[in-house]
Image (cartoon, rainbow, N blue to C red):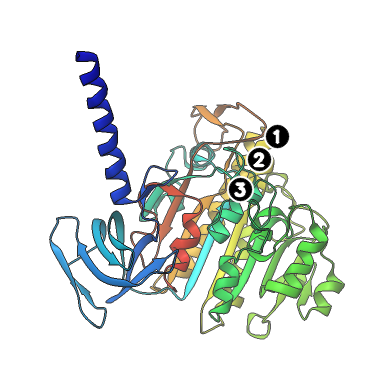
Amino acid sequence: MKKYCVILLLLFTISLLLFWQCSLGNRTDDGGILLDKYRKIVLVGDVETIHATASSTHQEIIWYSSDESVATVSDSGEVSGISSGNAIIHVGTEDGPYQQSCYVTVVADIPDNIILCIGDGMGFEQVKAAGIYKTGVSGSLEFESLEYANQMSTYSADNWITDSAASATAMATGHKVNNHVVSTAIPGDGSELVTVLEFLKDKGKSTGLVTTTHITDATPACFGAHEKSRTNYDAIASDYVNGSKPNVLFGGGGFGITAAMMESAGYHTVTTKDDFVAVDPLLSEYVSAQFGTDNLPYMYDEDTTYPDLSQMTEKALAILQQDDDGFFLLVEGGRIDHACHSNDIIRAIYETVEFEDAVSTVLTWMSGREDTLLIVTADHETGGLRVVVNNGPGVAPDVTWSTDYHTGAGVPVYASGSDENIIFGEFDNTHIYYAISDYFE
């Protein structure tokens, strides 16, 4: 008899758990709770906006703030009595009542400019090693002092260890895809996924891609192209000039890009450092700067033939800021990853420090401004790096490596700008797209 009672009790408990889960919605991969019809709630000023993933009629919305006090929503959509934080909403729809735990983001202002800086392959230990080398102390890189910080997951649709294409696609479009895919719905119907660059271009903003790899490499490609494979370089180049057409394209040349192609597409095209320095931002709406026929040289090798990442970033900002409607800029430190694939700690450090210099260039430009959102992150970690011994400033720390490929480790994400809560909670790389696009929906 006891045995049957235990079984009945277990069945009853399971039923309660299932009922509880259904009443709140479906659980997401990261353990959060997601109602079928809603992703999250965003308040832009006093205007209430609900982002629906399926059409429905919202007949009644009752807001509860984190302290369980009831907020009010007027007929005009003005919301009072709620602030940023964890909350519960009760929603009445044509399909019946729902309730959902969610995070409420209160946005004071919509940013004019969005700058996304990605250190390719840059995990927490790469950041730590660079800080130790530069100052003797970890936690000392300037972007580590940004107001908001979190850890981000990076897995792809078909592997818990992502490649750069799948991770960049997740950040650029908000969708998980298979490794090697460039902003295309695979798995899925193979359709083109709208990127945040394209989304903001449609809002009237200028756009730019800056990298230390060749400009058709995976990370920049996923923001301005749509291909089944990251190695379709000619097609990616064609997508740039015939599709997304960023105003600024700075990086290594070759791999589908030629000066003649860019000139014929209407770009002011430069291939030398002197010509690059001479570009007048006031007279240059579309600029293509492709240097050499491969990735840019490592900073450690002290090859000054071409501009470095911070110089390219400074020029891109000078050009893009001419647009009164604002801009979107991607800045990638792409060769951190290459050095880590080779388990080359000193070159990895130099590339990470240069990436920090580029972010510092952005922060200097942002000084005194309140119209810009900056996000600094990575696409994945490379090498399984671990810092073992701090040998002081100017000396590479002793480290260990566990692989010459990527790992599934979480990566850092930092933010500064007009929204204090854009990188909240359990954070996945797909959230980067929504952290940006939510302002404009």
| Dots 2, 1 in contact, CB < 8 A | yes
* Amino acid type, label 2: Arg
Residue of label 3: 120
Residue beneath the point at 29% across and 62% down: 96
| Nearest to viewer (mark 2 / mark 1) | 1
Judged left or right of residue 68, residue 78 is right
Q: Position of residue 111 (x, y in %)?
A: 42, 73
| Element carrying mark 1 | loop
- Mark 3 vs mark 1, foreground winner is 3
- Which label's residue is closer to the chain start, 3 or 1? 3
Give the residue at mark 1: 342
Q: Quadrant of the N terminus?
A: top left
At mark 2, the secondary structure is helix
Q: Which residue is mark 2?
A: 347
The CA span between labels 2 and 3 is 13 Å
Identify the residue at image location x=56%, y=82%.
322
Task: Kindly identify the residue that appears in the image at 38 percent across and 61 percent down.
Answer: 38
Of 320 and 134, the residue lying toward us: 320
Camera-nearest label, 2 or 3: 3
**Residue 258 visible in the current orientation:** yes
The residues tagged by marks 3 and 1 sit, at their Cα atoms, a distance apart of 14 Å
Q: Residue 188 falls in which quadrant of the image?
A: bottom right
Q: Quadrant of residue 78?
A: bottom left
